Image (tube, rainbow, N blue to C red):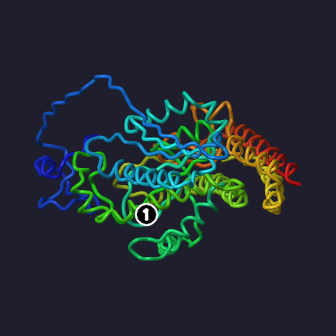
Amino acid sequence: MLPISYQDAKPLLAALKGAVAPPSWRGALPITYHIGPGPAKVHLKLEFDWQLKPAHNVIATLKGSEFPDQWIMRGNHHDAWVHGASDPLSGMVALMEEARVIGELAKKGQKPKRTIVYAAWDAEEPGLIGSTEWVEDHEKELQQKLVAYINTDGNGRGFFGAGGSHTLQAMVKEVAQTVKDPQKGVSLAERRGAVEMLNGGDSNFKLYALGSGSDYTPFIQHSGIPSLNIGFGGESSGGEYHTIYDTYDHYKRFKDFDFAYGVTLAKTAGRIVLRLANADVLPFELKQWETTVSGYLDEVMKTADDMRAAVEKHNMLVDKNAFELAANPKEPFLKPEKKDIVPYLDFSPIQNELAALKGAINTYASFDYTKLDDAKTKALNELLMKSESQLMSSSGLPRRGWYKHQIYAPGFYTGYGVKTLPAVREAIEQEDWKEAQTEIIKLAETFKQFRAHIEKMNTLIK
């Protein structure tokens, strides 16, 4: 797909004949919109540049004062399709300002306890190449040292959006309650809660699940590093995405007029980074994770039930000859056939493991971490750092083994769109019942592995 300006599109659209386009297909040009075909023909001349070019990741490190081998990583890509004022530079300049301020704090003697690593990724647009190659090259070290990765990309104006590992949900909510929205003067959490209620949801702050589309992908879905993706939007949409029109002038006129949300992004991400870098006990919270994942399982089981009910209704209508009786006899008709019944899957392995996991999580949540001595605090943090990796499978997802996370993945057919509990969910959606049952057992083993890890933490801090 190649985006073009409305000036270039107008003669092409005006030349189309055929049926008039339905209202939802019409734009705002002073023409009658038709859907074709033809009759005009268009000659396209395509030119490609197949040169190989080097990609440059820029990595800056501020060594921690107490735990230099525990890293907090913050990233944004710097390459763009063309000018890139919105995508990615609006996020990149916020990262640079955030890094500058943290550097100034360090100069004044307020060095972070943990090491902070800032990254400006190259080659994000052609397939997340810069970050992916870097993560793969440093994977073993990252899995040993990296506490969390915080990503931003293009930024806009409006409401705070945050997605990522749900063990970080409670901490991000705390930050969102302390930073003010520059337009309304209330907290980011309060303003976002308001729009969620207007859209039919509730005001409880939640992270969305990560699919793909930016540089967090190799960290969380391939390497098992807890990750976040944050930014602002909802009041700054435009048609400039990935085009030559994504300029400074366009951004200043139609996006973040006074760059107030760029400042707010720096404040928000900076607080998240410093909270992780300086926490005595890493701020991973498990009860909200369990609630979220249990909700995902409910969705998956309902999907199977809904599919079964739909098939049963379809077959009943076929038996009653309803489709043929309701059809227009003056139009062609192909009688539908009965469909195979959707079997009942055995979800009990997952249900039983989640129930046991909930018990272990409740035990962990009952401890008072402030009473731990330094040795136990250090040991607990080392276990917390490895918790996300327990949700990985070395064999990866079916037909795409690079994606190893069993809770979050971009859908096989959805591009950037996320699928939660992806192996089980997608097997059901594709009506591969044998694979679905196999993946149910595999997912139950993943939860068992995660529970064993939490029980190690419980044993440590008793």
Callout 1: SS: helix
Residue at x 74% of width, y 41% of height: 446
Q: Is residue 302 visible?
A: no
As drawn, the residue found furthest toward the front would be 108
Residue 438 percent across, percent down from the top left: 72, 37
Disc 1 marks which residue?
264
Of the pair 94 and 212, the residue shown nearer to us: 94
Residue at x 55% of width, y 51% of height: 228
Crowding around mark 1 (Cα neighbors within 10 Å: few <14, some 14 to 19, many 20+) is many
The picture quadrant where one finds residue 122 is: top left
- Tell me: 281 left or right of 43: right
Residue 199 percent across, percent down from the top left: 48, 71
Going by the numbered disc 1, the residue's amino acid type is Thr
- Tell me: 451 left or right of 273: right
Of the pair 119 and 105, the residue shown nearer to us: 105
Residue 362 percent across, percent down from the top left: 81, 60
Residue 63 percent across, percent down from the top left: 57, 42
Of the pair 357 and 186, the residue shown nearer to us: 186
The picture quadrant where one finds residue 130 is: top left
Of the pair 312 and 25, the residue shown nearer to us: 25
Image quadrant occupied by the N terminus: top left
